[in-house]
Every structure is written in structure tokens, then in C-alpha cells.
Amino acid sequence: MQEFEFNEEELKAESEQLQQIRYLTKENAVFARTEGGFVSLEYDGKKYDRVGVYRMFPISDPEHYISIREADEKAREIGMIVDLEKMPKDTAEMLREQLRLRYFTPQIEKIMDIKDEYGYAYFHVLTNFGACRFTIHMGGDSVVSLSDSRVMLTDLDGNRFEIPDIYRLTVGERKKLDLFI
């Protein structure tokens, strides 16, 4: 059995570093597209071959407070972009592209059918990307009301679907949906 050595000073230094907010700006950060279609970053004298791009407020403020993280399993934050509009135009568009991929959320335009069996709901819907079938777990947080009329559904695989305005659905479609809201 390997003994774990605890270094309190090292842990304290790492903790302080993680608590610092580092702001990424057009003056101190250079983003580039990799051959594989990902994003790399040069910041503070260090090159990150691949970074993850995350929204801190994906629903309420998608253009501000963009977290740039290492692309490993720890996903440690490298820094924060306060406002995408203040980055160079090509950089902002490259980061928006990464965000669209991460937060891909088809909008449900029509509910064709919903079946309820054994604690699961089986949806057959029409989205802005075409027809789709998915399954949600009836309990928990699979259906979240974002406002009086806006609903987010998350399927068993973690895919998100949005109904931007339930009042645009027909009365019949809303009745099918009422069991889950």
C-alpha cells in the first residue's frame, strides 16, 4: 500500500491560485484554431494546446463571463472573458462556435407524441433541426421551467431541448406536455 504524503503549503498555494480570477483580454490572450477544429490559447507565457469554453450564465447572460478551462479531466479554469464583444471579431466568432457546439439546444416547435411508461416519458417532436425522438426520466430535474412560458428538457443522455414559448404550441400539444411541467 502506497502512503500518501500531505504537503499543507503546496495545497494552500494551489488553493490560492484556484481562487484567483484571471481576466483574459485581447491584450493578454491569443486564441487560435487547431487542426482538429478545437481552440488553443497562449496566455501568461504558457501555451495550452486545447482549451474548453464554458458559459458561466448560459441562459441569462450567454455573451458575458466566458470561462476558459484546461481541456483535461480536471478542467481547471485558466481565465475569464468578461465580454465576448471586447475580443477581436475573429476570436469572438471562434469562441461562439465552440459555445454553440457545447450548448447545442434544439428548439421544440411541435410535439407529435409523448408516451409515459414505467417512470419514463418518450417524446416524438419536431425541432428546428428536424424530427427527433428522445426519452426523459419522469422524476428529478429532466424538465425545468426557465420562465412562465420557457421550458428546458434534458434527456437521458444529457442532451437539452428547449421550448422557447409553450403558448406557441397548440392546446393539444400543451395538454400532452402538462403531465411533465
Image (cartoon, rainbow, N blue to C red):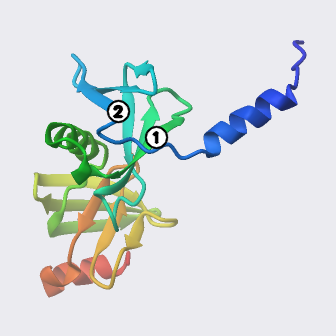
In which image quadrant can residue 51 be found?
Answer: top left
The vertical placement of 71 against 141, above or below, is above
The answer to whether residue 83 is left or right of residue 70 is left
Residue at left offset 37%, top offset 34%: 28
The vertical placement of 175 against 29, above or below, is below
| Residue assigned mark 2 | 29
The answer to whether residue 6 is left or right of residue 149 is right
Residue at left offset 34%, top offset 42%: 25
Q: Position of residue 114 (x, y in %)?
A: 26, 67
Secondary structure of residue under mark 1: strand
Q: Categorize mark 1 by other alpha carbons within 10 Å: few (<14), some (14-19), many (20+).
A: many
Q: Are marks 2 and 1 in contact (CB under 8 Å)?
A: yes
Residue at left offset 88%, top offset 20%: 5
Between 169 and 134, the residue placed more toward the observer is: 169
Q: Quadrant of the C terminus?
A: bottom left
Between 46 and 73, the residue placed more toward the observer is: 46
Type of amino acid at the residue the image marks with label 1: Gly
Between 15 and 145, the residue placed more toward the observer is: 15
CA–CA distance in space, label 2 to label 1: 10 Å
Type of amino acid at the residue the image marks with label 2: Ala
- The first of marks 2 and 1 along the sequence is 2
Q: Categorize mark 2 by other alpha carbons within 10 Å: few (<14), some (14-19), many (20+).
A: some
| Residue assigned mark 1 | 79
Residue placed furthest toward the front: 27
Secondary structure of residue under mark 2: strand
The vertical placement of 51 against 117, above or below, is above
In which image quadrant can residue 56 be found?
Answer: bottom left
Residue at left offset 50%, top offset 42%: 22
Between 57 and 176, the residue placed more toward the observer is: 57
Q: Quadrant of the N terminus?
A: top right
